[in-house]
Image (tube, grey):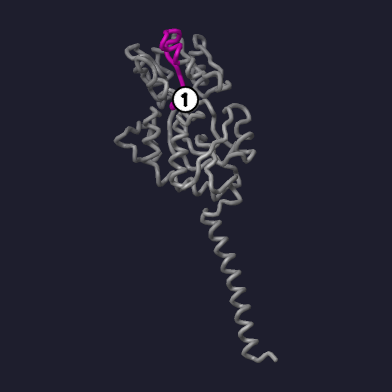
Amino acid sequence: MMTDCDRRCRLLVLLLAITAIFASSGAARAQTNDGSDLSIELVDPKVLRVCADPRNLPFSNDKGEGFENKLGELFAEKLQKKLEYMYFPQAVGFVRMTLGSHRCDVIMGFPQGDDLAQGTNPYYRTAYALVARQGSGLDEVASLGDARLKGKHIGIVAGTPPATNMTVNGLMVDAKSYPLMVDTRIDSSAEAMINDLTSGTIDAAILWGPMAGFYARKANPPLHVTPLVKETTGPRLVFRIGMGVRPADQNWKRQLNRLIQENQPAINKILLDFGVPLLDENDRPIGAETAKKSP
């Protein structure tokens, strides 16, 4: 026969069990809210799976030589995860075939304002730049409205923002256009443009900042790079770059934001080592001595 004590003990055990269930549920919710539970969002929570182009230096390649590869290594170390890549040429369909197909979890370089994916906080700020030979007279040009560019053969990637600025300033008549969408496994508009510049086929080149800095350093002799931050006509040519994740991956985004904030000096050093012309919020260059500043 069950005594009152037995009943009270069983009731206590039941209440403790119920309390434990609610506590566990609350802890799970807290874990999800603080961004530590990524099991639903990531392909494999134990692996940092990066969406990348196999041949698109200075950003990435399948040998791990790009600055986005180095950023992936940095983040994998901080997250204590294994690093893996899903490689696909960065052309039409790149986001859909990689991030959108759940074959990887982050695009390491993603412009702020692009709606193809959800962006993290930016980790660098840079601009399109004019590349010219040292001593050519164009290495001091800081704006596409400069009269010294009139009549010059200038390389431009078709469809990029500075093409509009060149049109406004009457520079497209003598320009040489290079394709925007190429299969990076077999072609590179940036590399072709720099080769034409060093050979004298064109007088100057306009490239996205990271490409300008990277290829200018590789040239022999090195070329001069001027970020185009003084434009008065056409669109602004300065952009903030973060990382791209799926729209639903809120915890993952928060974790990446924390990593960016905590590791900004190391991120800046990687970018500067690749010649990326970093800019602060006042369009002033960030060098090695000021690399600890956030973008």
The type of residue carrying mark 1 is Trp
Q: Which residues lie in the magenta part? A: 194-210
Q: Quadrant of residue 147?
A: top left
Is the residue 91 above or below the residue 174 in the image?
Answer: below
Q: Is residue 199 magenta?
A: yes
Relative depth, front residue between 62 and 225 = 62
Relative depth, front residue between 45 and 239 = 45
- For mark 1, does the 10 Å Cα neighbourhood hold few (<14), some (14 to 19), or many (20 or more) residues? many
Could you tell me which quadrant the N terminus lies in?
bottom right
16 relative to 232 in the view: left or right: right
Residue 156 lies, in percent from the top left, at 50, 17
Relative depth, front residue between 105 and 286 = 105
Write the residue at 45% across / 39% down.
Answer: 73
Is the residue 104 above or below the residue 92 in the image?
Answer: below
Residue 128 lies, in percent from the top left, at 45, 25
Which residue is denoted by mark 1 in the rendering?
208
Residue 94 lies, in percent from the top left, at 60, 31
Q: Quadrant of residue 280?
A: top left
For label 1, the SS is strand
Relative depth, front residue between 160 and 274 = 274
Write the residue at 58% across / 27% down.
Answer: 89
Q: Quadrant of residue 51?
A: top right
Q: Residue furthest right?
A: 1
Q: Residue furthest left?
A: 289
The image shows a total of numbered marks equal to: 1
Write the residue at 32% across / 32% down.
Answer: 287
Q: Is residue 209 magenta?
A: yes
Q: Residue furthest front?
A: 1
Could you tell me which quadrant the C terminus lies in?
top left
